[in-house]
Amino acid sequence: MTPASRIAAIVLAAAALPLAACSGGHESAASPASDKSPSAMSVTPATSATAGVPRAADTAGAHALPVFTPPPESAIPDDPFGDLVRKGRDIFMYTPRYAKEYVGNGLSCQNCHLDAGRLPNSAPMWAAYVRYPRYRAKNDKVNSFTERLQGCFRFSMNGKAPAPDSEVIQALTAYSYWLATGAPTGKDLAGFGYPTQGFEPPQAPSRARGQQVFASQCALCHGSDGQGQKVAGEFVFPPLWGPESFNWGAGMGNVNNAAAFIKANMPFSRGGTLTDQQAWDVAMYMDSHERPQDPRFDGNVASTRKQHHDSKWSLYGVEVDGHLLGTGTPAHEP
Amino acid sequence: MMGIQRWLLATIWLALATGAAGAATPDAAQIVAAGNGRGALPCASCHGADGAGQAAAGFPRLAGLDAAYLQHQLDSFADGTRTNATMAPVANALDAAERHALAAYYAGLPVPAAPPAPATDGDRALGGQLALRGLWDKQVPGCVQCHGPRGVGVGAHFPPLTGQSATYIASQLRDWQQGKRKNDPLGLMQHVASALDEADIKAVSAWFAAQPAAATGGQP
């Protein structure tokens, strides 16, 4: 290698990362044509001052909700029930490994329910357990907790629903029930779900701005292509779109839900550090990529959108950069 | 007479050619064994000929680490974002091409089969909790959630913790706590370290030192 070409190689190597990070920066904001732009009435103030502190208690109304802390894992009993609880925890943390036949992507439950389903504002399982049975508009019926778990497998895990009497459902139920030990039943607990209440975008979310947030805050772990990072065949950092990610039917595919999760929990370990606008923008960016088809697909993207994605926060059936979202991805490779 | 002149010419030519070649492509193995002659000490004198480091002294293993990670560390020693009295003069005595070559050299070495150092029961329990599950009350994830299963490392930004000594790991956590090391992306490790107390640091360092070393991950 000549000195000149060596210098060129070094310069290129140094430039490669920022270049890769900025590619795609030409994208413009997309919003479903049929919908009004997001309401501007909002406004949760940016709470960067609370960085490092779980955000539950700042949201209006959260003060009224009972606070609950799940028991420590050391309290899982050493008996057959405890064995099932531990099995449920393991499935929860490493789902493709322990519930392989029901998983159709590279995700685990704990990717969206942090700290093995214990963390407030990260849809903790102790809070979910005491909220079911419950009516859900998503399927227009009262869902049991079992049906709720099955929904996660069908959509978020892009897999198939385990039978109610399967060991996977039994173990996940036991784990959730144990986490909720001592919690009041039928009440919303502080930190349930993601903090969506009153969480509105200051300005209409922008994919272009979201792409910048992604490059600076997310690509480090999720990769510049959003496909996550693996070690020895298992994902350490989850893929955010594409064939190994959640499908179009998952709740995380709705920008408002994703924005609330991201605001409270991302970057991983630095929840609460993004501004509200950054969280909305990067959620819009994530959810404007192609992903596995909605299992409720009726053969037509437009009518599937009408039936299941009739929301300004779903980009299913919306054309982005000349691509009609909702046409799905190739099957994932186990 | 002619013979001696030719010999001299040939010798001078060879010396020039060798010197020129050395400047164009730094000989990493040479620097590792003997230094670069401009102030950079031989790497092997602390990190070992096989790049395994010296556990007792807290000199880290370099063998098998990601090349981009290693180069970033050398650059950080040079620009002061990673403060280290030993490494700063070494890194400053290396030019950019030499840092690049050394990083590639150590990345290409096999992971040494260093015997794991057993941890005490107390360190195993607390360290395992921190390593695998974290300290979420303080927004600290389990170490393995970024550094990979058992801490084998992930890509260019999350180096392996296996195959490093407890002394080294603990010293880095303290350096992050004290602001001596601030070359981590997004300030992730400065945040994590600030949430740990001395008992946590001791336990989690011992836990990783007790894991068998393994090839660096990050590739599918």
Image (cartoon, rainbow, N blue to C red):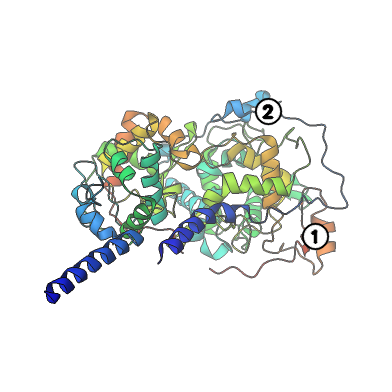
Q: Which dot marks residue A59?
A: 2
Q: Are marks 1 and 2 in contact (CB under 8 Å)?
A: no
Circle 2: is it few (<14), some (14-19), or many (20+) Cα within 10 Å? some
- Give how far across and how far down residue A212 sits, in percent: 65, 46
Please identify the quarter of the rendering in which residue A261 is found: top right
Question: Disc number at residue A81?
Answer: none
Of A41 and A310, the residue lying toward us: A41
Dot 2 falls on which chain?
A: A
Q: Please provide percent x and percent y for residue A102.
A: 57, 63
The kind of secondary structure element at disc 1 is: loop
Q: Is residue A77 above or below residue B103?
A: above
Image quarter of the N terminus of chain B:
bottom left
Q: Nearer the viewer, residue B205 or B182?
A: B182
Q: Residues at marks 1 and 2, common chain? A: yes
The residue that label 1 is drawn on is: A317
The image shows residue A187, relative to residue A106, as above or below, that is above
Q: Is residue A133 visible?
A: no
Furthest toward the bottom, the residue is B3
- Name the side, left or right, on which A303 lies relative to A332: right
